[in-house]
Every structure is written in C-alpha cells, then in structure tokens.
Amino acid sequence: MPRNPLCTPTDHRVTRRRFLGSAASAVGLSSLANPLVAEELKKQRRQVLFVWLDGGMSQLESWDPKPNTPFGGPFRPIQTAVPGIQISELLPQCAKQMKHLAIVRSVSTQDDSHSAGVERIQRGDPKNRGVTYPLLGSAVAKLVGPGDSGLPPYIWVKPMSGGFIYKDAGFLGPKYGALALGDGKPPENLLRPKAITAEEDNERNDLRKLLDKNYAAQRRTELTEANSYAYEMAAQLQKKIELFDLSKLPQKDQDRYGTHDLGRHMLLARRLLEEGVTFVKVTSYGWDTHGDHFNGAASLHPKFDKPFAAMIEDLADRGMLDNVLVIACAEFGRTPRINGHIGRDHWPQAWSVAMAGRGIKKGGVVAGKTNDKGTDVPNDPVDIGGLFHTWFRALGIDPTDAQYGNAGQPLPIAHEDMKAVKEVLA
Amino acid sequence: MPLRWTSLLLVLIASEGLRPRLAQAEEPLHARLDAFIEAKAKADGIPLSTPADDAEFVRRAYLDFAGRIPTAAETKAFLADTSADKRTKLLDKLLGGQEYATRMADLFNVMLLERLGDNPEWIKFLKESFEKNMPWDAMVKKMLRADPKETAQPGAAFWLAKRLENYGQNPVDYSGLTRDVGRIFLGKNLQCAECHDHLFIPDYKQQDFQGLHTFFKNTYLAKTVVGERPTVEKTPFASVFTKVQMATAPALPGAVMIDIPALTKGMEFSEQPDKKTGTPGVLKFSPLKEISERLPTKANADFTRNAANRLWFMLLGRGQVHPLDLHHSKNPASHPELLDLLASEFAGRNFDIKYLFREIALTKTYARSSKLPASANKAAPAQYFATAIERRLTAEQLLQSTLIATGSDPKSADTLRPKFVKAFANQAREPEEEFTPSLKAALFVLHDDAVLGLLAPKPGNLVERVAKLSDADTIDELYLAILSRKPSTDERTAITKVLAKHPDQRTEAVGRVAWALLASMEFGVNH
C-alpha cells in the first residue's frame, strides 16, 4: 500500500500547523525540503481569485444580455463555446472560455450605495451581531489558512496606493488583513540595503526576537504576535522579489493579458496564485457609468474580458482550476432603465456574478434568471449570503457547520438563513 | 443594644463594597477613581497587576506628557531619586514643562483631525490652547464656530474647513462632517441613522442625525475660511423604511429644535457677503454660532461624558465607554459611577484638561504595571484596567523618541517627520486608537535610511559614544538610552556574545544591537 507522503510523523505535525494553525505561526516556515511533500501540498491547495469590478459592471452588457427589449441597449448577444448560452458581444474572449464558467443571473442584493455596499457585499452581509465581519479575503485567509507559499494568505492587487489593510479583517484581527500591492508594485523598503549582509541581518533580527520573547513572557501576547507576524511577512516577501518583475515573463503573456492596469494586475495575480497565495483580490476601478454608459462599456468591458479569459485559460492549462476558485463580482449591477445621461445607475435588485474553478460545476452553467426586461428576479433570488455559502462549499467548507469564535462568541461564517446555489456546485 | 449597633457600623465601614461611596466626600479625585476600579475587580475576583516599577513609570509619564521617552540622564536621575513623592513631582514637572503643549497638540491633532491634513495655523491654535490650558469647552466652541472674523486664532476653523473640502472628485461630504461632530464631540456615531433610525441602537434616531446635520448643511468653504448660507427652513427627511415625511430645524441629539427666525428674503445678513472677493457675510441667524454656544456646555451630558471618556482613554488605553464613539444605553461604561464622577468633576473644574490629566495620572490604575499579575495565567478583560494596557505611540512620539534614544540632532525631526508619519500613521479618517503592527512599518524599521542613518556612528551620537565603553557599560547605556531600563541578565549575556563576535567591527555591531532595541515591541508601545 503506498504511503501518503504527508503522514510521516514530523511532517504531519508541520502540515497540521500550516493548514489549521494560525497564520502567524505558519508563515514563518519555509518550503518543505522534501519535494514529494511539496508536490502533495501543492495538490491540496485551496485558493481563490476574487476579481472586483468596483462601481458595478453592467450585467446587461456582460453576463445577462436582453436583446430587443426597451432596456437592452445597443449591444448584441453572441454564442459562447457552450451551445445555448449567450453572453454580450463585449465579452468575446470570455465566451470562448464558457465551458469553464458558471454564471448566476439571479443575484439580488440589499444595498445600492457604493460606500456601504462594497464592504457589505464583501463581508457577505451576515445578520448583525454587533461585530464587524471580515471581508471575504480575510475570511478565507482564516478558514483555509496560509497554505504552503510562505506568503501572506490575503494579497490585494489594486491601482494606486498599497499598504497593509488590516481593517478588512474585522473581528478576526489584524493578521488576517490584506497586503495591498499598490499598482502591483512591491511594498516600499522591501529590499535590504546592500550595506547589511544576510548574516548581520539575521544577527540583529535574532536579538529583536529575543527581546520580544522576553517582553511577551510576562504580558499579554497578542500584540507581540501581531508584530512578529509583520516582520515574518517582511522576511518572506523579500525572498519573492522576482514575482514583481513581469518583464521576465514571455511577451506572449503580456500581450494576452494586456498592458493596461487590470491586465498587468491579473498577470501578477496569476503569478501569486502559482506561488500558492491563498486569496488574491484584484480590483479594477471606474465601473460606475452613470453617464455615457454605452461608450463607457465598449471601452471598459474589453479591459476585463481579455485578462479574465486569459486567466481562466491559463489556470485550466496548468491544472490549477482544480484548486483555484475564480469569482468576478461587484457591489451591484446597473439599472436596466437608461437614465437621461445615457447612463445606467445602481441596481442591486437583479444582476449577475460569474465564477469558475474549484468546486464549481464544469462544462458551462447558467443558474437563475431575470425577468424579460431584466428588472427583477422573479424566482429564487440569490443574495450575497447565498453566494458566500456557494463559495465556502466550493472550497470544501460547510458553512452550516464551520463557525468563527470571537472571544467565546460563536459566529456563523455566512448568513444562516441562506443557502448555496446548488446548480453551480460540482 | 448600643454595642450591637456599633459593631454593625464597624462591619459596614470594613465592607469593601462601600468604600467608594464613603470615600467620595473627603478624598482627592484620583483616590475616588481608584476605589471604583478596585471595588469592581475585587467583586469579580480579578487580580490586579503590581505597581509599575520606576523605570516603567518614568517612561510612561514622559511619553504621555512630553511626547517622548526620557533621556538616559533623566531616567538615571529619576531612578536615583529616593524621595517618597518623586512620582508626583515628576508629573508636575512634565505637566508644567515646555514640551507639554507640543505633545498635546500632537495628541489632539491626531484625535480631532484623523490625519485629514496639516495646517500650521491649526497646530498653532492647539499649541497655544494647551500652553494657556484653555478649557475644553472654549476650544470646542472655537472649532465649531469657525468664525471667519476670528483673527487671534484663525487656525481653530481648520477642523471644520478641512471637512468642507471636496474629497477628490467627490462632493463635500456633509454626512461625514455630521458623523464626525457626533463621534468626536458627543461620542455618538450617528452615521447609520442618516437614512432611518439606527437598526441596532435604539437610542440613535434619524432625527438626531438630521438635526445635527442641519447645523452644517449650509456651510461652505470660502477659499480658506468657513462661510454660511442662510438657513431659512427646516430640513425635510423621511425614513427609507416608513417613508413618513418629517422635518427638522437645527437640533442637538435628543434636544429640542432651535427656532429658525422668519427673515424676509434678502434680509438674512447683517453684513452682506462680498461676491467679488468671496468674503462670507455675517448672518443674523447663524447655525454655527448656535451650535458653538449649545454643544460645548456643562449642561450637555453627551459633551461632558464624551470628553471625560476620551481623556481617560488617552492615558489608559481604553475608554470607560468603548468604542469611544458608541455612547448609548446598551453600551454602558465599564465603571458607570467612575465616568459620571469624572465627567462631573471635569465640568465642575471648568473643563480643565490639565487638572483631569493630573488626577488620572495620579491614580494607582495609571501607575499599574503592564506585566500580568503573578497569580493570573491569562490577562483579565481590558475593561477591568487590572493591568496597564499597552498603548500605540503616534508617529510623532516614535520620531521624537527615536531621536532622543539615538542621540541625534533634534533638528532632523523636520525632514524625518513625513517619513515617520507615512510609516506609522493610519490612513486619513481612520482613528489611531490601537497598536496595529504593519508590514509597512516593519519594512521601514528594517530597511529605511531614515532609521538606519540614525544608527550610523556620528560624533557624539549614541552608537559612537557607547561603542568606546566596556561591554557591560555599552549594554547598560544602550538599554537606558533606548528602553529606559537596565538589561536583564540573559539579555546582557546574549548581547555580550554578539559583541564578542565582532572585535574588529565593534561600532557596527553596537549599531545592530541598538537597532534591535529600537525595533523591539517594548520600544514601539507605551507599556
């Protein structure tokens, strides 16, 4: 009988810490020396790519076209690679990847404001229990763990500034916050100055650790743990500096993803996923097209279409769709009614979310539908809580069983009155 | 019979639970505050930490009232002082010292402006106020009035003016301004009551938000000063749930509406605005004047309790009511009588901030160690104040302390300040109330020349000076200069070993040891 390479006694202890232990204690461990174990760990990865189209992508010009209706707009639907499923002509590359995709067209959520909506959606809009719930990235970082990458479990690639966004973690605490890579660049001060050798760096850090250990020995330990975690993360990231140099990638990759922000950021996201980062969020801003919507969409949607389709294709080629759950989401869709500025406004009542990969049904699926004019979801609307159930299940986590513990208070990980969209689950 | 009464009385006096009430009349405020903390801990069986030792106390007091750690010489002098009242003397020296106003300007700037921006006039207003120990109600009155005709302290208006700027391409965030007035001056975050009564806090009504909002909705930024357009009618609003039409004049939360006088159109100003120069006019009915006279008063319990709670938080790391901006009946103070007393004493002393700080700093609660009690296997919940809570240092405290510790030129503060703020401050609009270690700060300490440059030997600086001493003296001096204490035996052993490895590059090795002390948790918090 072949032995499971994970189950030598010492390795088992280590991997349990990796998968179940806290991020702080696990990230410090470098890759395991045994290549067999490393390979096995890779197969067990559970990861998420979360593409966030901030401002709200129009469902009518993407996943749920309504041709020849009063609100349908000027764009036509096209056939996808899956017979019977049509999407907007603005997503031609995605149409080719349809066999990997699942679309939920019956999304209906509660908030039509950006300021509250972004966080509300990303927190899964649970019942209020007087605590601040984590955003999806922090939740997955907590529930799945840091994996075998040695990198922070939740990395956010976004335009503009970066930093460590601890607030995302809510009650889970700062260590589950996001490391944000502003414009995909490495964080400032990442590299050790040449004047300090590796030995000298170790020497000074060993002393720092000794001091912190002594300090924490008589005090509350949480702050020191969080502080050590920040330094551990700094050490791990320094080893991965080459990740940020996209110029070393084949020109073909850069062409396929595009050199625009979202293209470059998605390519970096692919590299981070290849490294085994648990949760990668990629944000694209500027989707709030209240005016001149159709010209806006004609320019915006291809910027999403190209890198998203390239990503799906690459993950499929590499066999990574078995491990990586891919989600394209926003805080709401856009109004079917076209306003006086030829724009579409905020519409949480009826919109679409696309997903692919780990735990998602293969072959191309559409779940749920909107009414003829696309204004409402007549049957079984799916709120974000239901999508959280779906995504957790896709990751192999049972949201009716798993709970967070917040200082003794058990908290459900997703809205307990909702359930998963079974049609899209494998 | 008489004998039995006497013994009953003795029992009553001896009973711990009664101490606070008995104490009230004759004892100073700080003793009465301690009595509440101790009584609750005792009742719930919570062990208290021992008093902080002198090294811990002197560091804490300097950070709080001078905005920096003590120099090695100051620490040594305090440790050597054998007088019984040396802690009181230290507090009085610091509260009366030159650095007090600068420290308070920093502390209050972070709380009031939340890193929205810098303005020299604003900092000048804060510094002058603390130099003169201006009462808190008077400071708030100036901030809320934001009078464009104020020439003595025009900086006071910056609190409001900054919030009336367009934020990127967004329109002026009047809702955010209303929220901030509620949060910072009244301890009530009414944000979620803008469109309906708060869903989970029954005390917070949509009327409260809208009434407060009505004071500010006609304010605008006239170049650099705050102007007001006439307020002639009530603000209509309706709950998004009930859709019932309501309307409100300016009103403080829970208070009656202010009458809006009926003025003929065109007659609203006693001094017309000048359209050419953009100078705002003077209104006959100014909601800003109204709120500046009505909000910061002894009669306004929201105002006094919020202020007392925030001052307590500043020195103890946690509010009596926590979070600081969620005062409501379902979120009572950890020690309700303590907060009542603190608020009434503060108001009774004409909002004398220095008096209140002094009394809080004289408590045994303030002077408790951050080390857990020997009998406790884990920390008691923070709301018992059983063990000193480690507090975040502002970027400015870290900068000043780093300069003091490394014996660097104080003038370098000007160039280093933006770098320290970038590394250690929160993003704008995020209160800096907790210690939150970050990758950004770790990388700054590890690799930025702003830190490493201070550890390179320069004539007279710490590293250059102590590297010439014997190992034992080098280590002692480093600890006193950076951590304000002496090293433990195992720390001394570990560092002696490191120094022994580098006989030829001793100065560089000393620099790395100094770095480790600067990068430690212990240096990075007020413990």
Image: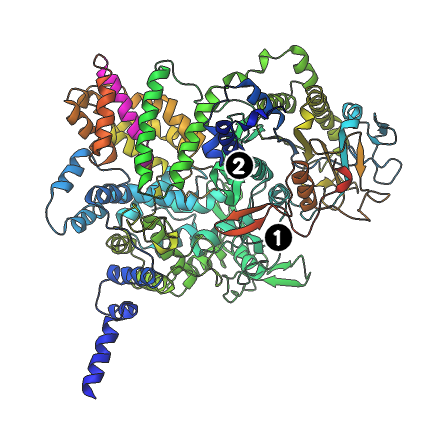
Q: Quadrant of the N terminus of chain A?
A: top right
Q: Quadrant of the C terminus of chain A?
A: top right
Span colored in magenta: B505-523
Residue A352 position, x and y percent, is: 75, 38
Which quadrant holds residue B197?
Answer: bottom right
Please tell me which residue lies in front, B26 or A252.
Answer: A252
Q: Chain of mark 2?
A: A
Circles 2 and 1 in contact, beta carbons < 8 Å: no
Residue B129 position, x and y percent, is: 31, 48
Please tell me which residue lies in front, A60 or B250.
Answer: A60
Q: Amino acid at mark 2?
A: Leu
Q: Chain of mark 1?
A: A
Residue B395 position, x and y percent, is: 36, 35
Q: Residue furthest right?
A: A68
SS for dot 1: loop
Q: Is residue B506 magenta?
A: yes
Q: Residues within 10 Å of mark 1 (few under 14, many from 20)?
A: some
Q: Residues within 10 Å of mark 2 (few under 14, many from 20)?
A: some
> Residue at label 2?
A20
Q: Amino acid at mark 1?
A: Lys
Which quadrant holds residue A285?
Answer: top right
Left or right side of A421 for B251? left
Whether residue B428 can be seen here? no
Q: Give the main secondary structure of the magenta stretch.
A: helix
Please tell me which residue lies in front, A173 or B30.
Answer: A173
Left or right side of B475 for B437? right
Image disc number at residue A127: 1
